[in-house]
Every structure is written in structure tokens, then in C-alpha cells.
Amino acid sequence: MDVNVIDMPAVPVAYLRYKGPFGAAIGDFWMEVFAPWQQAAGLQGRTTYGVAVDDPATTAPEECRYDACVEIEPGYLPQAPARLAELPGGRCAVAAFKGTGDQIPAAWGELFGQWLPASGMQMDARPCFERYPADYAMDPASGVFECELCIPVK
């Protein structure tokens, strides 16, 4: 796994929250809830983030929270149910991912289970997230897409 450690700036975002088991339901949430809201709010064509608020290894599946976020300009005022937040800046381990939604858990597992222990670094208290480029696209035939998996480190 090719991982780069970079300093990321803080990013203001608007987000919608999903609560429940991680997995395929999060993809459905992006397509059925977040993407239509993003378009209606005029926020398409921007970098988006998927933030795992809870660790599914230590949180009951029905209690897991995940925020689908989009970058905004300062001063943006969302309409409910959207909320505002700031993804904190700082040092992050960033791994490129290319695959399907079914393959993302294994990629996260490799990043946490192999790369992180071998790196000599530790996770800090900031949340882990996926970063999707402004020109994000999924191949409709294969379901393959690209994003970055980001772990805050110290």
C-alpha cells in the first residue's frame, strides 16, 4: 500500500449524518440522500468527504455515525437537515484507493492493520475520513471509483 504523510489544512464543510451499520447502506445514503441534497443546495463539483465518527470495532452497528460532507465557503448557511462542521487540519497518512464499495473495508483494514503499526506513527483523536475529488465519478458498469483514505497521525 502506497501511503504519503502530509499536512492537511482545516476544511469547512456542510454535512448530512447517517446512523447505522457501516457497509453498503452508506453507499445507498450517498446516492439516495446526500447526492440529491448536494445538487439541490448547489454544492456539486466540490471535494466531498466521508467521515467515520465512530469506530465500528467498538461501537454497536446501530449506533455507528458517518457524516457525508462537502466543502463550503465560510459564511455558507445550510438548511436543515444539513449541519456545519470543520474537518480539523493536521498531519494525515493518505492512501489512494481504487475499487468498489465492497473493497473499501479491506483497504481500511490494510491501512490500520499493516501500514500504521509498521510506520511507527500513532492515530490521534481526529476522525478518519475518505476524501473524494471534485470530479468524482463511479464507473456505472463495474462500480469502481477512486478516493483517498485518510488517517490522522502523530
Image (spheres, helix red, strand yellow):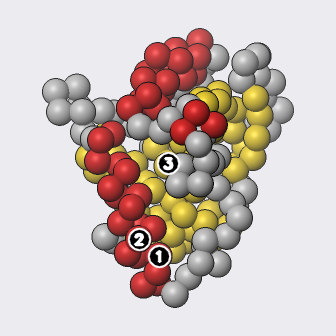
Q: Are marks 2 and 1 in contact (CB under 8 Å)?
A: yes
Coordinates of residue 75 in the picture (x, y in percent): 83, 32
Q: Amino acid at mark 1?
A: Leu
> Where is 64 relative to 90, above or below?
above
Estimate the x, y position of residue 54 in percent, counting from the top left: 63, 48
Q: Quadrant of residue 64?
A: top right
In the rendering, which numbered label is found on residue 116?
1
The quadrant of the image that shows the C terminus is bottom right
The amino acid pointed to by label 3 is Arg
Mark 2 or mark 3, whichever is nearer to me: 2
* Residue in the image at 69% along x and 32% along y: 14
Query: Is label 3 or label 1 in front?
Result: 1
Report the residue marked by disc 2: 113
Can residue 70 be seen at all in this image of the molecule?
no
Residue 21 picture location, percent across and down? 50, 35
Foreground: 53 or 46?
53
For the residue labelled by badge 1, is the local secondary structure a helix, a strand or a loop? helix
Q: Residues within 10 Å of mark 2 (few under 14, many from 20)?
A: few
Q: Earlier in the sequence, mark 2 or mark 3?
A: 2
Where residue 26 appears, x then y in whole percent?
A: 47, 32
Residue 11 appearing in the image: yes
Disc 3 target residue: 131
**Which residue is at 75% across, 46% downward?**
86
